Image: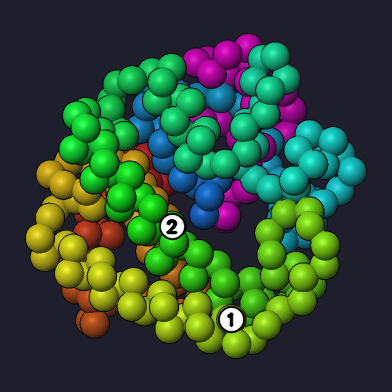
């Protein structure tokens, strides 16, 4: 598992100057941490507390003007700041274990489910979360954009659509042991992060979605899920 700190020690596998700006509780940084743990890659991490607004402070904006996490800083100063882009970068550097698909059809299936989970799941759960939490009263949109007031109706709509997403995943796990097929991929990483995040807005896959709940229990047995 990658090491967390506020300094700049060298990672054992990520490259001497590589650094990941992270937030322990946020879903997108967690996607990267789980992915790296599955790959056995360790890089230094710097914690950025979004809820306290550390991502909007000048020190962090000097690293990433978008004010989002995760942000990967490479040896040459290049930054990557979208979680799946960061995962694809490491997949290309270290192809095994393969997590994005081995043949054209599997690659397409992984990508299809990955996108569905982002748009139908993560997007709507985030809308419910950011449009209802007091800490985000004028930050309903992520990052360093203009002040964005909360819209309670968007929280309500997010919950409605997120419940529908849970129904979709319940149906999917009646057909397949993993999200995109018969083995673990990055789509499963996005799904476990999404479904765990759903609990933050009061959506729990228990009696109403027993297959989802069973799948979550299996995913939590993987050491990477605790990253």
The residue sitting at 50% across, 78% down in the picture is: 158
The residue sitting at 36% across, 79% down in the picture is: 163
- Residue 11, position as x, y percentages in the image: 58, 18
Q: Could you say which disc has been placed on residue 154 in the image?
A: 1
Q: Is residue 203 above or below residue 123?
A: below
Looking at the rendering, which quadrant does residue 170 occupy?
bottom left
Q: Could you say which disc has been placed on residue 118 in the image?
A: 2
Does the segment drawn in magenta span residue 23? yes
Residue situated in front as seen by the camera: 5 or 46? 46
Does the segment drawn in magenta span residue 190? no
- Residue 179, visible in the rendered structure: yes
Disc 1, SS = helix
Nearest to N terminus: mark 1 or mark 2 = 2
Work out which residue is located at the far right of the displayed protein and give it: 58
Q: CB under 8 Å between callouts 1 and 2?
A: no
What is the chief secondary structure element of the magenta stretch?
loop
Number of residues whose C-alpha sits closer than 10 Å to that of mark 2, classed few (under 14), some (14–19) or many (20 or more): some
Q: Is residue 18 above or below residue 218?
A: above
- Residue 195, position as x, y percentages in the image: 38, 64
Mark 1 to mark 2 CA distance (whole Å): 17 Å
The residue sitting at 33% across, 20% down in the picture is: 95
Question: Magenta segment range?
Answer: 1-26
């Amino acid at each position: 598992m990658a090491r967390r700190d506020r300094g700049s020690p060298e990672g054992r596998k990520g490259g001497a100057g590589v650094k990941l700006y992270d937030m322990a509780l946020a879903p997108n940084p967690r996607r990267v941490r789980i992915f790296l743990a599955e790959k056995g890659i360790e890089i230094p991490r710097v914690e950025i507390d979004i809820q306290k607004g550390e991502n909007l402070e000048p020190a962090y904006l000097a690293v990433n003007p978008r004010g989002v996490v995760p942000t990967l800083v490479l040896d040459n100063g290049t930054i990557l700041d979208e979680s799946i882009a960061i995962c694809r970068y490491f997949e290309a550097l270290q192809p095994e274990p393969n997590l994005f698909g081995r043949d054209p059809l599997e690659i397409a299936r992984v990508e299809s489910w990955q996108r569905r989970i982002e748009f139908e799941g993560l997007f709507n759960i985030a809308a419910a979360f950011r449009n209802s939490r007091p800490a985000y009263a004028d930050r309903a949109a992520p990052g360093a954009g203009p002040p964005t007031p909360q819209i309670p109706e968007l929280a309500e709509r997010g919950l409605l659509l997120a419940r529908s997403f849970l129904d979709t995943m319940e149906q999917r796990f009646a057909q397949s042991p993993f999200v995109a097929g018969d083995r673990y991929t990055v789509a499963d990483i996005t799904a476990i992060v999404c479904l765990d995040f759903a609990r933050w807005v009061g959506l729990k896959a228990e009696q109403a979605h027993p297959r989802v709940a069973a799948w979550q229990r299996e995913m939590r047995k993987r050491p990477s899920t605790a990253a």
